[in-house]
Amino acid sequence: MAANPIACASCGSGLCGGKGRETFYQGTWANNPISIQVLGICSALAVTTTLANSLIMGLALIFVTGMSNLIISLLRATIPRKVRMIAEVAVIATFVILFDQLLKAFYFSMSERLGPYVGLIITNCIVMGRAEAFALTNPPLLSVVDGLANGIGYAFVLAIIGTFRELVGDGKILGFTVLSEGWYVKNQLMILAPGAFIALGFLIAAFNYINARGQKAEAKS
């Protein structure tokens, strides 16, 4: 009988016979949750008015996806199939509430700026999707890698959009003036909702272009 390539975290070379590296690459780039799968874009559009907002929201998703994937993977053999989605939501909600409370305790101004969007991570299809599609069928260590990878991929896209919108819309990055008002006219469109759609559209187009060139190069080699 052939061995399961992802049956443990120590088989083969590297993490699970190289599965860890591939899983990380898929989550962060090749199958990026926003730019490729176009998931979780509501929060991506709503909170990316500044880079600081984007980084904190990205950190929240990294924490929640990593920890929820770990717990769900550890419990995968004991969760009844009929109630698995309820169990997944309960686990995800626990870590979302924990992060939200920590944010309120130590960074209240940011908690006010993000508003309900941290709490809405509970319903984010990226987190639920990784729990359902990956953590339920894979070992804990690999599930953590998958959760962190998708969280990092999400945060990476948010950081790019947040940087672009804050720079073009307000001439600043992280509150520091980069484009002086003496010669730069602020583009308020980038601060508004249409600016988020424009930035995301260009970013998705760039990802598709880069991936298409990579696939052509692989086909020729």
Image (cartoon, rainbow, N blue to C red):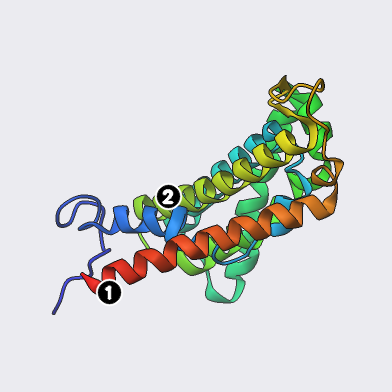
Q: Residue 200, percent across and down? A: 67, 56
> Residue sitting at 24 percent across and 56 percent down?
16
Disc 2 or 1, which lies upstream in sequence?
Answer: 2
Vertical placement of residue 28 versus 104, above or below: below
Kindly report which numbered mark, 2 or 1, lies closer to the viewer in this rendering.
1
Query: Which element carries disc 2, helix, strand or loop?
Result: helix
Give the labeled residue for mark 1.
219
Residue furthest out toward the front: 183
Residue 60 picture location, percent across and down? 62, 40
Q: Residue 144 carries which label?
A: 2
Residue 144 seen anywhere in this rendered image of the structure: yes
Quarter of the view holding residue 3: bottom left
Q: Residue 1, how many percent across, how many down?
A: 13, 79
**Vertical placement of residue 184 versus 123, above or below:** above
Whether residue 182 sits left or right of residue 28 in the image: it is right
**Amino acid of disc 1:** Ala
